[in-house]
């Protein structure tokens, strides 16, 4: 079983890369985000997921172990195969996907080609408890995002996030800013203070 490949990028196609490893060309199917970071003739390292079926053996390549874990996790959801999982990872970075799941934002997930509303709903519903472990750099803010997604965040926190969203910031940006503001101001801070500190955070 292949778990990692290190070599030279020989060719980049629409949905895969050929990686030359000591003279052997491995075909690894990748998300567009991964492919866009590769350059022909340059060295590259890919985390690999090997899928073996009766009629084929196929390698899938990822820029990080976190991206590979999301690929594996997405495929546990009914209606999500390798092609759809790659489409989602082409559309959303791992941290954005974790945020969308935490916020139960099925519309964000449904932006990926081939993902309908029902599949998007299953993804955010079935994976919500797994999002914190696969949030990457977004992990410190994932708890607040989950509370907002489930409608159980404290009123002043929800109001502050709503206010920042109304000012044109994305919901994930607003949630991260309010999360940082909450750490600075303490649990008892009112919405006005959280908004003020949140704006300061967004401006920095």
Image: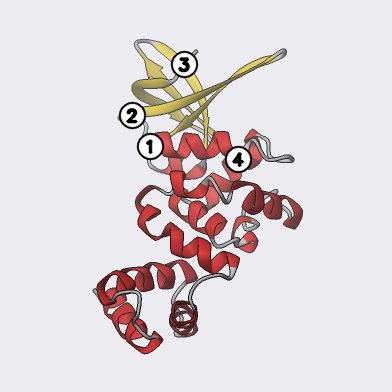
Q: Is residue 183 left or right of residue 166?
A: left
Pointer 2 or 1: first along the chain: 1
Q: Secondary structure at mark 3?
A: loop
Pointer 4 or 3: first along the chain: 3
Choose mark 4 or mark 3, whichever is in front: 4
Residue position marked by numbered label 3 in the rendering: 2
- Asked if marks 4 and 2 touch (Cβ < 8 Å), the reply is no
Residue 14 shows up from this direction: no
User: As rendered, which of 152 and 174 lies closer to the eye?
Assistant: 152
- The answer to which quarter of the image holds residue 121 is bottom right
Q: Marks 4 and 2, Cα distance to the nearest angstrom?
A: 25 Å
Q: Residue 22: where, in percent of width, then height?
A: 34, 11
Locate the C terminus by quadrant: bottom left
Choose mark 3 or mark 1, whichever is in front: 3
Q: Is residue 68 left or right of residue 8?
A: right
Q: Residue 13: where, in percent of width, then height?
A: 52, 34
Q: Is residue 191 above or below residue 179?
A: below
User: As rendered, which of 48 and 182 lies closer to the eye?
Assistant: 182
Residue position marked by numbered label 1 in the rendering: 38
Residue 80 shows up from this direction: yes
Give me the disc on residue 71: none
Pointer 2 or 3: first along the chain: 3
Residue shown at the point (34%, 21%) measured from the top left? 6
Hey, which residue is sitting farthest front in the picture? 188
- Asked if marks 2 and 3 touch (Cβ < 8 Å), the reply is no
Residue position marked by numbered label 2 in the rendering: 44
Residue position marked by numbered label 4 in the rendering: 74
Residue shown at the point (44%, 20%) measured from the top left? 3
- Asked if marks 4 and 1 touch (Cβ < 8 Å), the reply is no
Residue shown at the point (60%, 40%) measured from the top left? 74
Pointer 3 or 1: first along the chain: 3
Q: Marks 2 and 1, Cα distance to the nearest angstrom?
A: 7 Å
């Amino acid at each position: 079983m292949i778990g990692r490949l290190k070599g030279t990028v020989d060719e980049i196609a629409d949905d895969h890369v050929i990686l030359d490893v000591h003279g052997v060309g491995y075909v690894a199917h990748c998300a567009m985000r991964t492919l866009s970071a590769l350059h022909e003739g340059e060295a590259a390292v890919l985390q690999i997921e090997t899928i073996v079926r009766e009629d084929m053996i196929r390698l899938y390549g990822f820029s990080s172990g976190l991206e590979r874990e999301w690929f594996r996790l997405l495929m546990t959801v009914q209606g999500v195969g390798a092609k759809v999982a790659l489409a989602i990872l082409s559309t959303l970075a791992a941290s954005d996907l974790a945020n969308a799941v935490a916020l139960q934002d099925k519309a964000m997930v449904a932006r990926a080609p081939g993902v309908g509303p029902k599949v998007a709903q299953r993804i955010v519903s079935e994976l919500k408890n797994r999002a914190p472990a696969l949030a990457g750099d977004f992990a410190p803010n994932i708890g607040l995002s989950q509370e907002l997604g489930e409608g159980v965040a404290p009123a002043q926190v929800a109001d502050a996030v709503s206010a920042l969203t109304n000012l044109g910031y994305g919901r994930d940006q607003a949630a991260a800013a309010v999360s940082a503001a909450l750490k600075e101001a303490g649990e008892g801070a009112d919405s006005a203070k959280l908004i003020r500190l949140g704006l300061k955070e967004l401006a920095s």
